[in-house]
Image (tube, helix red, strand yellow):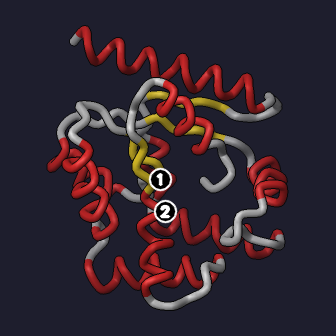
Amino acid sequence: MPGAGKSLLSRAAEMLGIPVLVMGDVVREETEKLGLEPTPENIGRVAVLLREKYGDDVIAKKILERIFSSKSKVVMIDGIRSLHELNFFKRKAGEIIIVAIHASPKTRFKRLMVRGREDDPKTWEEFCKRDERELRFGIGSVIALADVMLVNEEIDKNEMLKRAYEALKRVITDEDSS
């Protein structure tokens, strides 16, 4: 969910030399191609429009091209939102290990207010609408299937980065030994 700490997990992956591919970047790029300002509403509309027009796995298909062009044995995909996307990756990209990060809505909202990215919600109402959209996509089902769950609540960024790094290191080590 937005504000849970995916960027810290991404930073930990980069520290381990793992390329990070961000699903949300695809939607932001498509929003810009349409000449729209990257507001939460526009990005949300484009995400829905893409899925309605091209199928529920359209963003995953665009990321798959980037996976194959990376030529890396291991990649991190930031932002799988639905079982359609997850199942697409399982069919096309091989073994998938899901690492989910959980933080309460109140904590995530506070973080987004501080982060201040252009497409972040500006009000609690916008935040709730965004959460509802994410849940409609099916992100809750993806989180429920996580192989690794990190809780990012009441700890500072450095501690979360350390936990994310250790979790990813364990996942990679387990994969190398199997």
* Among numbered discs 2 and 1, the one appearing first in the sequence: 2
Indicate the secondary structure of the residue bearing disc 2.
helix
Q: Picture coordinates of residue 41 (x, y %)?
A: 63, 82
Q: Indicate the position of residue 74 as horizontal and vertical percent values.
A: 29, 32
Residue position for label 2: 24
Q: Badge 1: how crowded within 10 Å, few (<14), some, or many (20+)?
A: some
User: Residue 86 in the image: x percent, y percent?
Assistant: 31, 51
Label 1 SS:
loop
> With respect to residue 30, does 169 lie above or below?
above
- The amino acid marked with disc number 2 is Gly
Task: Give me the residue at 49% from left, 81% from top.
Answer: 31
Q: Quadrant of the C terminus?
A: top left
Q: Amino acid at mark 1?
A: Gly
Drawn side of residue 134 relative to residue 16, left or right: right
Please state which of the two labelled residues, at mark 2 or mark 1, is closer to the viewer. 2
Residue in front for this viewpoint, 98 or 140? 98
Q: Residue at 47% x, 28% y: name it.
A: 148
Q: Where does residue 83 sit, x and y in percent of width and height?
A: 34, 55
Residue 79 has which mark?
1
Determine whether 164 is above or below 102 in the image. Answer: above
Image marks 2 and 1: residues in contact by CB distance under 8 Å: yes
From the viewer's perspective, tell me whether residue 151 is left or right of residue 115.
left
| Residue 162 position by quadrant | top right
* Left or right of 129 on screen, residue 88: left
- In this view, the residue in front, 40 or 136, is 40
Q: Is residue 45 above or below residue 99?
A: below
**Label 2: few (<14), some (14–19) or many (≥20) C-alpha neighbours in 10 Å:** some
CA distance separating discs 2 and 1: 7 Å
Q: Which mark is residue 135?
A: none
Q: Residue at x 55, y 77 (%)?
A: 44
Name of the residue lying farthest toward the top: 177
The residue nearer to you, when weighing 20 against 122, is 20
